[in-house]
Image (cartoon, rainbow, N blue to C red):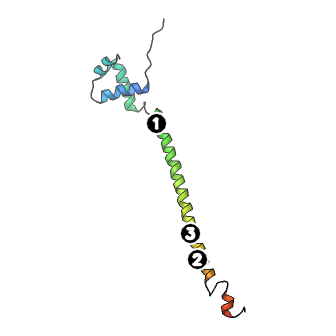
Amino acid sequence: MGVYRRKYTREYKIEMVERVLQGHTTLEVAKENDLYPELITKWKKQYMDGKFHGSSTNDIELKNLRAKICELEQMIGKLTMEAYLLKKEKKFALALRKETLSPVTGPNSEWLKGGVS
């Protein structure tokens, strides 16, 4: 007959290690959760080495949020450029309109010169 080995989730391991880091003794946490103290010590070393960080649900959610932020920043940049160009176009159209309405250079400027009767 084979030996039964319990499997623990990453969240469970992190929870146990964080309890130890918060000031509980390894032995205390081990007894409360029916674990070997050496196992918690091993998890603590892995935790300190950063092996428990990387692809948890929080990390995936964080990556998704960062991607959304990048997408929104690009959209803001595009809209800012469009607004800038529209303002420039408006100024140009107003200047052109003023120029065509001017009696000196406008469509009736020939009348002022005496060329058209």
Q: Say if mark 1 contacts mark 2, CB within 8 Å.
A: no
Q: Amino acid at mark 3?
A: Lys
Q: Name the outermost residue toward the front.
A: 117
Using the rendered view, name the quadrant where residue 89 is placed. bottom right
Say which residue label 3 marks. 88
Q: Name the outermost residue toward the bottom.
A: 114
Q: Which badge, 1 or 3, comes first in the chain's sequence?
A: 1
Mark 1: which secondary structure? helix
Q: Say if mark 3 contacts mark 2, CB within 8 Å.
A: no
Mark 2: which secondary structure? helix
In percent of width and height, residue 19 lies at 32, 27
Which part of the image, by quadrant, shows the C terminus?
bottom right
Residue 1 versus residue 10 in the image, above or below: above
For marks 1 and 2, give the CA distance. 54 Å
Using the rendered view, name the quadrant where residue 21 is placed. top left
Q: Left or right: where does residue 25 sit relative to residue 10?
A: left
Q: Amino acid at mark 1?
A: Asp
In percent of width and height, residue 99 lies at 61, 81
Q: Pick whichever, 109 or 23, lies toward us.
A: 109
In percent of width and height, residue 4 lies at 45, 11
Say which residue label 1 marks. 59
Question: Marks 1 and 3: which is nearer the front?
Answer: 3
Mark 3: which secondary structure? helix
Say which residue label 2 marks. 95
Q: Left or right: where does residue 68 sit relative to residue 49?
A: right
Label 1 neighbourhood size at 10 Å, few (<14), some (14-19), many (20+)?
Answer: few
Q: Amino acid at mark 2?
A: Ala
Residue 5 versus residue 70 in the image, above or below: above
In percent of width and height, residue 109 lies at 66, 88
Q: Which mark is residue 73?
A: none
Q: Pick whichever, 51 or 7, lies toward us.
A: 7
